[in-house]
Image (spheres, helix red, strand yellow):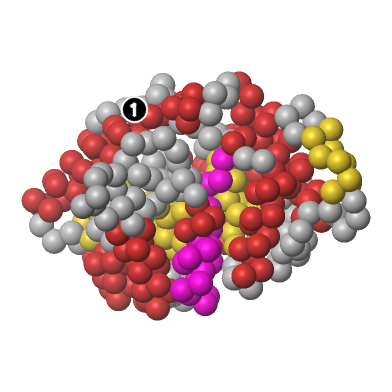
C-alpha cells in the first residue's frame, strides 16, 4: 500500500502580535518530516473566504514545500477550475512541475461550498460548464506547440502559445474529485485518476472503486489500484478521553464546513462524523487500514489533525505492515 497526506494549513488572523505565517511554516515542516518518514505525497486543499485562514493560494504553498523536499509528490485536492483563468492556471501548474522535476499531481474539481460561489459572484449552475471549458483550455495549453485561439462562453484567447512546458508529458498527472456515480463515470471517461473524499463509509468506497474499475475496463484500459486515492482522517489515540475530545473537534470542524457549504445531505451526528475517521490505538488503526485494503484501497491519504505526532506513530507502528501487502 501507499500512504500520503491530505489537508490544509491555517494562517491565523489578528493584530500585530499575531504571527499569521506560523501555521504555514509548521505545515511546511510537517511535509519535510513526512517525506523523511516515507510518505509518498501531500494533497493540499483550496478554499476561500472562510474567515479562519484555510489555504487559498495552494500552488504557492506547494512551491515552498517542493523547494524543501526532493521526492514528495505535490498534489492539489482540489483546485476548483471554475474560479480560475485556465491559461494562467496551466502556466502555474507547469512551472511547479518543472521546478519539482515532475512531482505535480494536479487534482481538479468543480467546487461545492456555496459561500465560495457567492463570494466570486458565480452561479453554482455554471459550475459544470465552466469546469469543462477550463479543462479544455488547460489541456490545449499543455499540449499545443503552435499558436492557437479559443472563443468560448467564459474565456477567449487569441493566437497564444502557453509557456512553460511541463516535465511530465503530455501534461502533469491529473486527478479528479468524485462523489457520485455520474462524476465517477466522468473521471473514468476523461482518463484521470480519482480522489475519494474522507466522509464516505467503507461500504460506499467499495462501491465507488468497483464502479470506477468497471468504467475504466469498459473503455478498454487497464485498471491500476494506485489510480484511486482515499482520504481519511486518522488520529492515533491512547485513551477514551482523548477519543472523545478528538471526536468533539471533528464534529465542530464538520459543522463549520457545513455552514460554508450548505449541503442538503449533511448529518450533524457523532455517528456520521465517525464514519469518515480512523481514530484509536495503533492496533485499531491497523485493522481499519487492513479493512480498506480488503475492499480494494491501495492508496490512503491521511488527514492527521494531531499533525507530526500521528504521522510519526503511523509511520513507525502501522505503515511497515503494509509496505509489501499484496
Please report the residue visible at 59 percent of the width from the left and 70 percent of the height from the top: 100
Q: Is residue 263 magenta?
A: no
Give the residue pinned by disc 1.
259
Depth check, front residue: 309 or 22: 22
In the rendered structure, the answer to whether residue 1 lies left or right of residue 225 reads left
Image coordinates for residue 163, horizontal then vertical, percent: 76, 59
Count every numbered label the image shows and give the total.
Answer: 1
Vertical placement of 296 versus 250: above or below? below
- Taking the spot 59% from the left edge, 59% from the top edge, the residue there is 105
Q: Position of residue 103 (x, y in %)?
A: 59, 68
Looking at the picture, tell me which residue is in the foreground, 249 or 199: 249
Q: In the image, 201: left or right of 154?
A: left
- At x 49% / y 24%, what residue is drawn? 118
Q: Nearer the viewer, residue 272 or 130?
A: 130
Residue 236, image x, y percentages: 23, 61
For this orientation, the residue located farthest to the front is 16
Residue located 62% across and 70% down the image: 99
Does the segment drawn in magenta span residue 65?
Answer: yes
The range drawn in magenta is: 62-81
Neighbourhood count class around disc 1 (C-alpha, 10 Å): few under 14, some 14–19, many 20 upward: few
Hey, which quadrant is residue 168 in on the image?
bottom right
Element under disc 1: helix
Q: Residue furthest right?
A: 146
Question: Does any portion of residue 213 appear in the rendered image?
Answer: no
Image coordinates of residue 60 in percent, x first then y, are: 51, 57
Please say whether residue 204 is visible from this viewpoint.
yes
Amino acid at each position: 500500500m501507499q500512504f500520503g497526506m491530505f489537508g490544509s494549513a491555517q494562517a491565523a488572523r489578528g493584530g500585530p502580535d499575531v504571527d499569521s505565517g506560523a501555521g504555514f511554516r509548521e505545515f511546511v515542516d510537517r511535509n519535510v518530516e513526512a517525506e523523511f518518514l516515507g510518505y509518498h505525497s501531500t494533497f493540499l486543499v483550496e478554499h476561500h473566504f472562510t474567515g479562519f485562514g484555510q489555504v487559498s493560494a495552494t500552488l504557492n504553498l506547494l512551491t515552498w514545500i517542493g523547494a524543501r523536499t526532493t521526492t514528495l509528490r505535490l498534489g492539489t485536492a482540489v483546485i476548483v477550475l471554475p474560479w480560475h483563468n485556465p491559461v494562467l492556471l496551466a502556466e502555474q501548474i507547469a512551472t511547479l512541475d518543472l521546478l519539482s522535476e515532475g512531482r505535480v499531481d494536479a487534482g481538479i474539481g468543480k467546487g461545492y461550498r456555496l459561500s465560495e460561489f457567492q463570494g466570486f459572484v458565480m452561479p453554482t449552475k455554471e459550475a459544470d460548464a465552466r469546469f469543462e471549458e477550463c479543462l479544455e483550455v488547460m489541456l490545449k495549453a499543455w499540449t499545443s506547440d503552435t499558436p492557437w485561439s479559443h472563443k468560448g462562453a467564459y474565456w477567449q484567447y487569441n493566437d497564444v502559445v502557453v509557456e512553460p512546458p511541463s516535465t511530465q508529458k503530455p501534461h502533469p498527472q491529473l486527478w479528479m474529485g468524485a462523489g457520485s456515480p455520474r462524476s465517477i463515470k466522468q473521471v473514468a471517461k476523461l482518463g484521470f485518476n480519482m480522489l475519494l473524499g474522507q466522509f464516505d463509509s467503507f461500504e460506499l468506497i467499495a462501491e465507488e472503486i468497483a464502479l470506477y474499475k468497471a468504467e475504466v475496463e469498459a473503455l478498454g484500459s487497464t485498471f491500476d489500484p494506485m489510480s484511486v486515492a482515499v482520504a481519511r482522517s486518522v488520529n492515533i489515540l491512547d485513551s477514551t478521553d482523548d477519543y472523545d475530545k478528538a471526536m468533539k473537534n471533528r464534529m465542530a470542524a464538520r459543522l463549520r464546513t457545513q455552514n460554508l457549504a450548505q449541503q442538503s445531505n449533511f448529518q450533524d451526528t457523532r455517528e456520521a462524523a465517525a464514519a469518515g475517521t480512523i481514530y484509536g490505538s495503533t492496533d485499531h488503526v491497523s485493522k481499519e487500514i487492513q479493512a480498506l485494503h480488503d475492499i480494494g484501497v491501495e492508496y490512503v491519504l491521511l488527514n492527521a489533525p494531531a499533525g507530526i505526532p500521528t504521522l510519526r506513530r503511523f509511520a513507525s507502528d502501522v505503515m511497515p505492515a503494509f509496505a509489501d501487502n499484496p
